[in-house]
Image: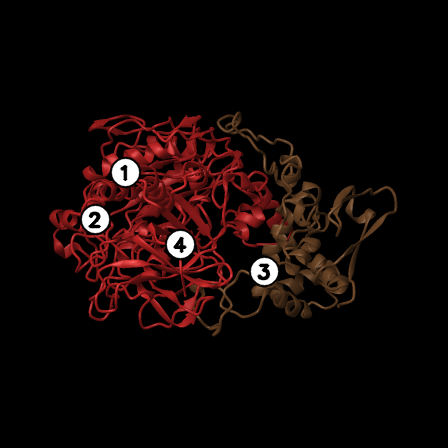
């Protein structure tokens, strides 16, 4: 195997966290940084003229090529897992910019109590209220410690929103339930389309506290602290599953890549599929030497590095540790081992679909435009008399409705799904239908984890990652409660007919439920229960750092991108300010 | 090489429509003059294409609520999709073993590609396009719980509402039917107005939006 010239830092994956780390290290420390991205190169100039629903949103042409690699799925460890043969419950990204290119831009902070989920829940409700097979834990970091990094991430993205809590002072119109923030959002909220306005008005009337979603889709032109200027969103309605045509949605290619281009000490190598992380020796795994990767011709190369970062999303971060035999794989029988544990998704579904008399003009919108309520999020409401813990937010999105995905949603009174009667009703309701969504917490359980599949292989002959995942009674019970709240709001919005969510049964790998998969290489305050420290540093291999949602101990209901960027900033600071001086465990 | 197969469209049956012919040049058919155009099929045989066209027309009929699958060119759309990477499962994970009996929550586990599902499924519909409409509906009701039917239904909706560059939604007829304006670059001035009122700007296709600055190459034309 050919050995390439050594670099100071090699970063596996060129998405949000990988490129942010490359930019921070490269611009602030002068280290030589190499990003290895297995997908194709991308530039923001690629996107004009690509507003095609069929290829991008239905055929999902920006996503990972599943013919090369997918995951296998099962509900419990007694079952035989089968591959997710086509895209389903989540959509793994690929290529430079990763899933950060085709995200929607919804950018909330996590509710403060999420970071001490275990200790705060036990303190308030007692240990007996926790589900018997839970594996929830604290993050080893507090919201107060996160706040400055949240503020930096918001400034970088130019988040458009309305603060609800500035240094403890509640601000009407913002999210009154959010954690304190040091300042107002960088830009004002986006425009709010009609359907979301109807939701906000009805929620307010019912005594809830609606607020505009924080959006990475700019409400007005903005220049961030790095000097990157982006223009305002045009509400074309092509965000999710698309790259932004005008650069209004923050994406790695328009927010980070311009800072990396032209820097001699930072380079991005696309078409480089990292195969293994190489550590000293099988017995003495205390130092990463670099990585091996396969280039586009299929030749395996060794890339030595002083620092190794895994930034290749939840699935691949976990799989690379398992394939490279770094750390102890989680064993469901004994409960020992850490790599692969605490797999969580997010409890998300259309809680109530409302059918209106008036047209909604739903083709206009923006990926994050909409109104939410957090009255039933986290532990912000009392659970003493409820059959579940925790919660989430209800939201009326106006992301721009497209016809292939949305034609044919008809009121429950219409019983057929083809022919003249159906066509007539579907045309009538095409622009008179909207759904109230719910996104809630998925607790971590001992029985939900990732390991290597014994049967199915990827394109290179390596085992696929295997998901063992199902919902618990807590999630099912929470879903039922939230559905009833959503139906109440839908009725108050003036809907003629409302159809409600039919309940969470087994984990459905077929139904899209956001691309927010967490866990596998989780952070925590001790090596017995986590893979990385709160600085995202590997407990056993201190020159190995892991970035992204694989480090989140359990899902905290809100969308995770802003949080993983904040965590990446925190790790970059710790490395630049301290690790480079004393190469040891960061405390 | 297989024999060249064509689908013939007559102007009297389709109206003043813009049809994308094989060489990707738009071609307009005028109903008053007795014209016809022969469109070369990429995957389906002529008799299969006629069955697909007839079945799609019962799923999404041309009736008093407006034009349907026939006018939108759904059969041409489906033929192109089957010929392209989607039709042959280019991007699907197809390693063995195929455990087709796995619970439905894990998604389609079969080995059959969309091409194969059409070719097999259409064998049950031989002569369909020559049947009276009521018999056609009965025939579809017999198969409406099959995976082939749900694929055909899904593809019919796609062919009604895709950008015309894919061969369906000819002349944006599907978009006009539901008041969808297509990929408009900007709704900035309108997104927070027209509350409760139908705002229906003229439909534009990708070709018009990008004013030919960016040539969009649809996936089905991939080599």
Residue position for label 3: B151
Dots 1 and 4 on the same chain? yes
- In the rendered structure, the answer to whether residue B179 lies left or right of residue A3 reads right
Assign a secondary structure to mark 4: loop
The answer for how far apart the CA atoms under marks 3 and 1 are is 41 Å
Residue nearest the observer in this picture, B194 or A510: A510
How far, Cα to Cα, is label 2 from label 1? 29 Å
Pick the residue in front: A28 or A182.
A28
Mark 4 crowdedness (10 Å alpha carbons): few <14, some 14-19, many ≥20: few
Q: Is residue A224 left or right of residue A168?
A: right
Residue at the image point whose x is 44% and y is 39% from the top: A261
Q: Colour of chain B?
A: brown
Whether pointer 2 and pointer 3 mark residues with C-beta atoms closer than 8 Å, the reply is no
Q: Chain of mark 4?
A: A
Residue that label 4 marks? A502
Q: Is residue B86 above or below residue B126?
A: above
| Circle 3 SS class | helix
Q: Which residue is mark 2?
A: A534
With A183 as the anchor, is B166 left or right in this view? right
Residue A560: image quadrant is: top left
Q: Secondary structure at mark 2?
A: loop
Label 3 to label 4, Cα distance in Å?
24 Å
Q: Quadrant of the N terminus of chain A?
A: bottom left
Residue A313 seen anywhere in this rendered image of the structure:
yes
User: Whole-Å distance between the Cαs marked 2 and 4?
Assistant: 39 Å
Of labels 3 and 4, the one closer to you? 3
- Do labels 2 and 4 touch, CB within 8 Å? no
Most distant residue in the front direction: A5
State the mark number for residue A375: 1
| Residues marked 2 and 1, same chain | yes
| Chain identifier, red in the render | A
Please tell me whether mark 2 or mark 1 is closer to you in this view: 2
């Amino acid at each position: 195997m050919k050995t390439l010239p050594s670099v100071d830092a090699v970063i596996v994956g060129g998405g949000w966290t990988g490129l942010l780390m490359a930019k921070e290290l490269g611009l602030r420390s002068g280290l030589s940084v190499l990003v290895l991205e297995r997908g194709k190169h991308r530039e923001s100039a690629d996107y004009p003229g690509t507003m095609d629903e069929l290829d991008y949103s239905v055929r999902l042409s920006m996503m990972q090529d599943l013919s090369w690699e997918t995951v296998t799925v099962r509900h419990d460890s007694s079952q035989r897992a089968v591959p997710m043969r086509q895209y389903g419950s989540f959509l793994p990204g690929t290529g430079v910019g990763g899933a950060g290119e085709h995200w929607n831009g919804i950018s909330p902070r996590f509710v403060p109590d999420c970071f001490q989920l275990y200790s705060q829940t036990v303190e308030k409700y007692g240990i007996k209220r926790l589900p018997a097979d839970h594996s929830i834990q604290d993050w080893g970091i507090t919201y107060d410690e996160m706040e400055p990094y949240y503020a930096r991430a918001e400034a970088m993205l130019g988040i458009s929103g309305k603060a609800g809590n500035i240094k403890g002072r509640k601000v009407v119109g913002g999210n009154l339930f959010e954690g304190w923030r040091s300042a107002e959002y960088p830009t004002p909220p986006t425009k709010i389309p009609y359907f979301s306005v109807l939701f906000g008005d009805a929620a307010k009337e019912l005594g809830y506290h609606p607020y505009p979603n924080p959006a990475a889709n700019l409400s007005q032109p903005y220049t961030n602290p790095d000097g990157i200027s982006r223009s305002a969103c045009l509400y074309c309605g092509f965000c999710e599953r698309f790259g932004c045509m005008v650069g209004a949605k923050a994406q790695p290619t328009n927010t980070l890549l311009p800072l990396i281009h032209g820097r001699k000490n930072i380079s991005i190598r696309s078409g480089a599929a990292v195969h293994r992380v190489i550590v000293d020796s099988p017995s003495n795994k205390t130092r990463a030497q670099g990585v091996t990767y396969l280039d586009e011709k299929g030749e395996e190369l060794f890339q030595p590095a002083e620092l190794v970062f895994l930034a290749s999303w939840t699935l691949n971060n976990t799989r690379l540790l398992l394939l490279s035999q770094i750390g102890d794989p989680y064993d469901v029988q004994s409960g020992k081992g850490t790599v692969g544990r605490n797999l969580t998704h997010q409890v998300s579904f259309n809680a109530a679909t409302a059918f209106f008399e008036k047209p909604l003009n739903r083709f206009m919108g923006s990926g994050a435009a909409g109104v939410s309520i957090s009255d039933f999020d986290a532990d912000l409401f009392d659970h003493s008399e409820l059959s579940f813990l925790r919660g989430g937010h209800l939201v009326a999105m106006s992301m721009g409705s497209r016809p292939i995905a949305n034609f044919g949603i008809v009121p429950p009174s219409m019983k057929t799904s083809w022919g003249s009667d159906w066509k007539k009703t579907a045309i009538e309701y095409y622009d008179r239908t909207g759904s109230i969504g719910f996104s809630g917490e998925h607790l971590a359980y001992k029985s939900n984890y990732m390991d290597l599949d014994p049967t199915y292989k990827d394109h290179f002959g390596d085992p696929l990652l295997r998901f063992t995942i199902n919902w618990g009674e807590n999630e099912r019970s929470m879903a039922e409660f939230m559905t009833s709240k959503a139906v109440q709001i839908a009725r108050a919005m003036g809907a003629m007919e409302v159809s409600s969510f039919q309940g969470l049964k087994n984990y459905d790998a077929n139904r899209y439920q956001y691309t927010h998969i967490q866990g596998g290489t989780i952070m925590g305050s001790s090596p017995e229960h986590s893979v990385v420290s709160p600085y995202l540093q590997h407990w056993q291999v201190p020159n190995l750092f892991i970035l992204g949602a694989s480090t989140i101990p359990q899902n905290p209901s809100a969308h995770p991108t802003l949080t993983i960027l904040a965590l990446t900033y925190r790790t970059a600071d710790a490395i630049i300010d301290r690790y480079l001086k004393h190469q040891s465990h960061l405390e | 090489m297989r024999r060249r197969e064509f689908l013939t469209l007559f102007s009297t049956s389709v109206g003043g429509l813009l049809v994308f012919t094989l060489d990707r040049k738009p071609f307009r058919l005028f109903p008053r003059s007795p014209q016809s155009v022969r469109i070369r099929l990429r995957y389906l045989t002529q008799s299969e294409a006629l069955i697909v066209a007839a079945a799609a027309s019962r799923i999404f009929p041309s009736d008093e609520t407006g034009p349907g699958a026939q006018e939108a060119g759904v059969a041409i759309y489906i033929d192109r999709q089957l010929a392209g990477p989607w039709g042959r499962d280019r991007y699907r994970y197809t390693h063995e073993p195929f455990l087709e009996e796995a619970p439905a929550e894990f998604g389609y586990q079969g080995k059959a590609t969309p091409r194969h599902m059409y070719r097999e499924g259409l064998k049950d519909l031989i002569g369909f396009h020559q049947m009276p409409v009521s018999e056609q509906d009965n025939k579809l009701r017999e198969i409406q719980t099959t995976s082939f039917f749900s694929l055909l239904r899904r593809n019919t909706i796609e062919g009604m509402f895709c950008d015309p560059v894919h061969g369906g939604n000819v002349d944006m007829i599907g978009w006009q039917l539901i008041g969808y304006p297509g990929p408009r670059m900007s709704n900035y001035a309108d997104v927070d107005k027209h509350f409760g009122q139908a705002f229906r700007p003229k439909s534009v296709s990708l070709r018009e939006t990008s004013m030919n600055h960016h040539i969009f190459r649809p996936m089905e034309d991939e080599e």
